Image (spheres, rainbow, N blue to C red):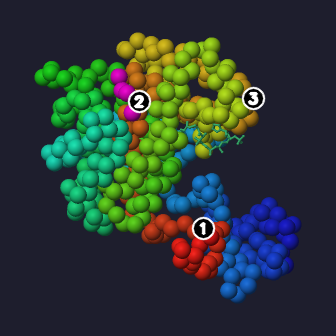
Amino acid sequence: MATESAVTENGTGAGAAETLTITDNRTGQTYEVPIEDGTIRATELRKIKASEDDFGIMTYDPAYMNTASCRSAITYIDGDRGILEYRGYPIEQLAEKSTYLEVAYLLIHGELPDQRQLEEWTHQVTMHTFVHENVKEFMQGFRYDAHPMGMLLASVGALSTFYPEAAQIKDTDNRYLQVIRLIAKMPTLAAFSYRHNQGKPYVYPDNDLSYAGNFLSMIYKMTELKYQPDPRLEHALDVLFILHADHEQNCSTSAVRSVGSSQVDPYSAVAAGVAALYGPLHGGANEAVLRMLRRIGSTENIPDFIAGVKSGNERLMGFGHRVYKNFDPRAKIIKQAVEEVFEVTGKNPLLHIATELEKIALEDEYFVKRKLYPNVDFYSGLIYEALGMPVEMFPVLFAIGRTAGWIAQWLEMIDDSEQKIARPRQIYTGARTVDYVPVSARG
Ligand code: CMC
């Protein structure tokens, strides 16, 4: 029988075995489980049985706190050191030097494009920005004040009915066309959702403009023949799209992978991602931040608000992250972008409350002890508001950027021979073999 010291010895010497020795104290039996990439396969634990007919040991991991669900070469995060890289490129460099479309290419293809590839990619995406007129009519059927995220969720899912061939997910050419369509049409659906919510006519894409510039045109164009976006705002929006483009196995990406694992078409899988992003703990957080800042109203009210958070009444929205426990590198870049945008639009008084709130929270023991720092959403809402977006549009803007990541992850999953339909296990805690009693006889 292996002892604990034997395991330690194994783990310290040169050429130490890359295995984990487990002793089942119920039976006295020991098991050797291979360690690969600092990970053991959960299915290996099934060999550990108390009796012949035992199912075998499972891991219990609500919210996937310590479970890797895939191998991925797309996004690297080191939460303790505040590192975020797409395909190995640091987020700081991409935000400063690249564009969203180039980053989307990088995420999807695995490497930065050369000049010709970039031009071709940009041309293809630009040529697919229009949606079928029936999509527009379908969207016009929503209630006059429909939340744009709900409209985006429904309309991106509805694209599967316009492109039924998208169900052929094993056909690579076909699949690539859907990838282009998704990147291209997401801003159009998002802008139509916004215009609908505002009671304004939908604006068709302007293919002379950049990805972000065209989006701003579809949002703001009124009677002018041509909308000219302010290049500084266009750039800030593009940077925000880059920062949101991927974040490895977050809630919405896991949703895309999980739903996509059923081999459904990518529009339906991405609709699942939009649905997950709609929630206040994920893409809805920046909306919640703005509402929170408005409710606080003035810096004098911050101490009361913080006291409420500390007593567990509510959360400081835009703070904390499952992975980043030191700082969120995206928050740093966004803070810089806030300054740039405010140079154009003038300062928002909420910025003052946000900076004060951040300062107070970063010095407060409650937040320090729990390693709670501002995340990407603490400041992104302020930029969106400065761009004239209502809070309902915040998660929609997040979804536009995240589409590249969702698709890259979906493609990686499809080509991963180890992946199967996602199907977690459970620990059943309910009643068993209860006899049915007719309603008339129930006490
Ligand atoms: N305000 C106050 N307390 C908090 C907060 C917060 N924002 N976040 C976590 N805590 C506390 C929590 O109450 C717990 O305290 P205790 O140990 O005393 O019970 C401790 O910190 C650990 O929190 P947790 O809920 O176990 O952490 P988590 O990893 O499950 O949650 C989170 C991560 C992002 C959901 C959470 O920090 C949160 O709700 N933040 C506010 C919402 C937000 O800003 N979300 C955007 C995330 S970034 C964008 C994205 O990638 O989607």
- Where is residue 410? Give x, y as percent: 40, 57
Q: Is residue 282 above or below residue 378?
A: below
Q: Secondary structure at mark 2?
A: helix
SS for dot 3: helix
Label number found at residue 426: 1
Whole-percent x and y of residue 32? 72, 74
Q: Nearer the viewer, mark 3 or mark 2?
A: 2
Residue topped by disc 2: 391
Q: What residue is rendered at 42% in x and 64% in y?
A: 261
The one of 120 and 225 positioned closer to us in this rendering: 225
Residue at the image position 57 percent from the left and 21 percent from the top: 296
- Does residue 389 show up magenta in the picture? yes
Q: Name the kind of residue labelled 3 in the image.
A: Glu
* Most frequent secondary structure within the magenta stretch: loop
Q: Contact, CB < 8 Å: mark 3 with mark 1? A: no
Measure the C-alpha gap from mark 2 to mark 1. 38 Å
Which residue bears the numbered disc 3? 365
Q: What are the residue bounds of the magenta stretch?
A: 388-392
Q: Quadrant of the N terminus?
A: bottom right
Residue at 60%, 67% (x, y): give it.
426
**Residue drawn 74% across and 35% down?**
369
Which comes before the other along the chain, label 3 or label 1? 3
In space, the residues marked 3 and 2 are separated at their CA atoms by 31 Å
